[in-house]
Amino acid sequence: MTSGATPPLLALRGVSRRFGAVRALIDVDLEIRAGRVIALVGDNGAGKTTLVNVVSGVDPPDVGVIEWEGRPVRITHPRDAQALGIATVHQDLALCENLDVVGNVFLGREIHSYGFLDEPVMENRTRDLFRMLSARVPDLRLPVATLSGGQRQTVAISRSLLGQPKLILLDEPTAALGVEQTAHVLECIDDMRDRGLGVLLITHDLGVVKAIADRVSVLRLGRNNGFFDVNTTSQEDIVSSITGATHSDFKYCEQDEIDWEL
Amino acid sequence: MRRPRNAAPGECGGRPPTKNARSAVIKRAAVNRHLATFGRRLKAGELGSVPVLLGLAAIWMVFQALNSQFLSARNLSNISVDMVGTGMIAVGIVFVLLLGEIDLSVGSVSGLAAAAFAVLNVNLGMAEGVAALVAILVGSATGVVQGFFFAKVGVPSFVVTLAGLLSWNGLMLYILGSTGTINLDDEGLVALLTSYYFNDVAVAYTLAAAGTAAYFLVSYHDSRCRRSLGLGSRPLGDIALHTAMVAVAVFAAAYVLNRFQGLPLALLIFLLVVIALECILRRTLYGRAIYALGGGVEAARKAGLKVAWVRISVFTISGTMAAVGGLFLASRVASASQTSGSGNLLINAIAAAVIGGTSLFGGRGSTWSALLGALVIQSIASGVALMGVPTAAEYMITGGVLLLAVVIDSLSRRAQKAHGRI
Ligand SMILES: Nc1ncnc2c1ncn2[C@@H]1O[C@H](COP(=O)(O)OP(=O)(O)OP(=O)(O)O)[C@@H](O)[C@H]1O
Ligand SMILES: [Mg+2]
């Protein structure tokens, strides 16, 4: 790489994570650049969620280096990731059932003065966020336990938009959403890219990948199985990479990644 | 502004309504929306303190029918003092239950604190204030130890506090040695905790007025803050109605207490503790973290909350409140003995919290439930004692009420599940 190139927003180098006998991630590399949407695809159990947990500090890796804007960093706690500007929509949504919508959106980042919560301001901000997503919930003060699956997903997404994140990790954010709401979320992702955020989007919907992502990274059985440029790769090639019909040469892909950035 | 769900036709109809009609329509819409929200919350299993208030009314009516002395000023005043010891312990239990955990050691800890105070003050001659403080800190320390084993080592709270129940009881017997019962100084500070009454009727009435005014001002201020941001706010009439209900309750209590010996100091302290801790639970970052842990530990962890720290602190609060309760119980009998904190104190404290409406499943509850639940339990104990039937009946009635409370809790959780796919 030439010395003048800007370093990627986030880079994973040789990250591995095992759960007992299960090797969920094996020597995984990944680069996410500002202003780009990277889709991460792979079959069930490929390790996508594990990778998100590594980056969001929920589940630190066993070995491997995480670089943030070119500097190696340690992300061992969700607060570390938050401090760097990494926001996450977890696959399980990570909502507190008993808290209301406002409480969930601001969980861990409450607006307060001397430890006393400023509820009206938080509710106001939440209302604005929902308006931005054109989302509707019956009442921002109802516990999320009473919301539908799609409504909860909207809550989780609004949560990640709070503050000024630089990188957003979306683990199947539209899985439970209706057509209209999915379109809004995709618009929103487009918007994030335009604002110069880095986005990692996990989805099983290759249509969505085609529509919105710049690059695709495929995971298979915990290993990198190819990086592709969405515009120049056919959907069939991506599918065969996911299912393991083809084995991309990893070294070649890395080279490709660099060429593409120059 | 949230759009009123039940907007009357006039609002969007063709002819512009007159100003008066318009404001009436808006008011009606606001009231309707409020009712709709309330209905939704009821259906969603957010019953709050409605069941316990109904239960309390029923219990009082039954015992009054059986014995006309039950609702006398003297008896009600005694109930209000007797419930404080158990109630203080129950407040700590509420915190633990909010996490979805349990603390079985509170009875033993309260006995340990009472014994520690008695030995330090009476046997070793330590100044009363210092001895009381040390006793309370001993309670806090037990909580820190149990919290550590639960949060850092990962032992289930049920097991840690069961071990605590035995150990702290052993420690109490050890420090009491062969002394047996230690009598406290009748004129001392701790004895005064439950024997002092504000005889001046003005005290109770002034505090009742101040409490009502404070309730109104806080509600009004909250509502105005919300309105200034354009958020849906409680209509003034709704605040006025609630304030009126609070006023009736506190002035009735003040009137009854004044007909005996005035406002008991113990009750005043208990109320202040309940209100202060409720404020912490509802309005601070720390309280929010406690509710969050009760609603989903994983979610709280992913949001970056310090899970272990919150857990240890909650068990510390539980131990501290158990010690405070132990001092009030010792004060009531003016002694500490080997039976302090034993018997059904533990069950009563947990039952009080649950009967008052705090969920056993975590994440739902309030310190007011400790007060209301303790009031129910003490009312049963008192009513049974007045009738002169054996304690067997008291146990069975309390057990029945506890079962009823748990059933309501479980049913409302099921309603929530059906409603919201927990
Ligand atoms: N906490 C854990 N303990 C043990 N094994 C785990 C744990 N988390 C994940 N795994 C294993 O790691 C592998 C990868 O899981 P992961 O959740 O990352 O898959 P995924 O790609 O997100 O799949 P999906 O598309 O179904 O969400 C799986 O084989 C899973 O069984
Ligand atoms: Mg997954």
Image (cartoon, coloured by chain):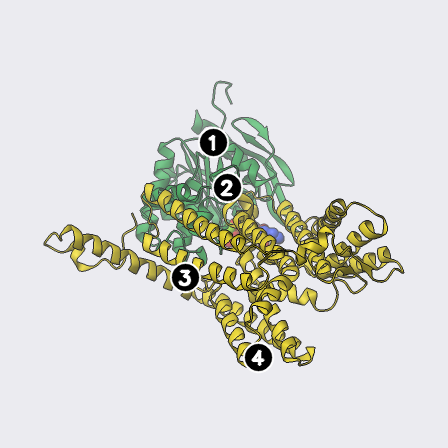
Chain colours: A green, B yellow
Q: Amino acid at mark 2?
A: Phe
Disc 4 and disc 3 in contact, CB within 8 angstroms: no
State left or right for residue B301 relative to residue B214. right
Label 4, secondary structure: give it: loop
Q: Which residue is mark 4?
A: B67
Q: Which mark is residue A32?
A: none
Q: Are discs 3 and 2 located on one and the same chain?
A: no
Q: Marks 4 and 3, how far apart in space?
A: 38 Å
Chain ID at mark 3: B
Q: Is residue B319 left or right of residue A8?
A: right
The local secondary structure at tag 3 comes to: helix
Q: Chain for mark 1?
A: A
Mark 3 or mark 2, whichever is nearer to me:
2
**Tag count in the figure?**
4
Viewer-side residue, B68 vs B379: B68
Residue at the extreme top: A4
Q: Please state which of the two labelled residues, at mark 2 or mark 1, is closer to the viewer.
A: 2
Instruction: Please state which amino acid type lies under the numbered disc 3.
Output: Arg
Q: Which residue is mark 1?
A: A257
Residue B41 numbered tag: 3
- Residue lying at the far left in this picture: please name it: B15
What amino acid is labelled 4 in the image?
A: Asn
> Can you see residue A54?
yes
